[in-house]
Amino acid sequence: TPEIYTLSLHDALPISVRSPSQFATNVNAFCAPTPVTPDASSLPALKAAAQAEYAQIDAHVLTLKDATVNGDAGIKGEFTITSTSGTTLTDTQYTALTKSSSACTITLSTDNPRSFQQIFSKISSTIRLS
């Protein structure tokens, strides 16, 4: 069974940045079992899955590249998506494979990317998977 976690950054951190559209900047984490082996050779499969996901939600991909997550090989994607209310959201997404055969995706979402870029970078360096 997949596990899903959501954290509003405004609740967790002393952030005084206002959202132009009242969007709650947040972090979501999702882990699910996978048959993919956790090593650098799995990166093309992770990228292909991310591309398919982004296409399915009609996202505009800004970057999709190799990344290190908690010392393991993973990918980092950055994309924008427009909500049904017309708000453009910017997402930074990290996906990595755990040693316990799960694929974990951490997504940081905001409608104010300039204000949250530094915070998102700090958060990404604290991601821990087990």
Image (spheres, rainbow, N blue to C red):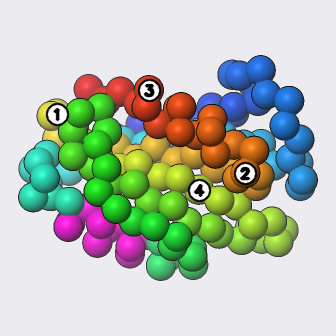
Q: In the image, which disc is placed on residue 91?
A: 4
**Real-space Cα separation, disc 1 to disc 2, in angstroms:** 36 Å
Q: Give above or below for 71 relative to 90.
A: above
Reading the image, the residue beneath label 3 is 126
In percent of the image, x 39 and y 54: which residue is there? 76
* Magenta region: 44-53
**Real-space Cα separation, disc 1 to disc 3, in angstroms:** 20 Å
First-in-chain label (1 vs 4)? 4
Q: What kind of residue is marked 1?
A: Ser
Percent of width and height locating residue 100: 16, 33
Question: Dot 3, crowdedness within 10 Å: few (<14), some or many (≥20)?
Answer: few
Reading the image, the residue beneath label 1 is 100
Give the foreground label among 1 and 4. Answer: 4
Give the left or right position of residue 52, taking residue 71 as reference. right
Disc 1 and disc 3 in contact, CB within 8 angstroms: no
Query: Tag 3, which secondary structure?
Result: loop
Q: What kind of residue is marked 4?
A: Asp
- Residue 123 is a magenta residue: no
Query: Tag 4, which secondary structure?
Result: strand
Name the quarter where the C terminus is drawn. Answer: top left
Name the magenta segment's main secondary structure: helix
Looking at the image, can residue 3 be seen? yes
Query: Tag 2, which secondary structure?
Result: helix
Give the foreground label among 2 and 3. Answer: 2
In percent of the image, x 46 and y 67: which residue is there? 63
Q: What kind of residue is marked 3?
A: Thr
**Real-space Cα separation, disc 3 to disc 4, in angstroms:** 17 Å
Disc 1 and disc 4 in contact, CB within 8 angstroms: no
Q: Give above or below for 76 relative to 45.
A: above
- Residue 50 is a magenta residue: yes
First-in-chain label (3 vs 4)? 4
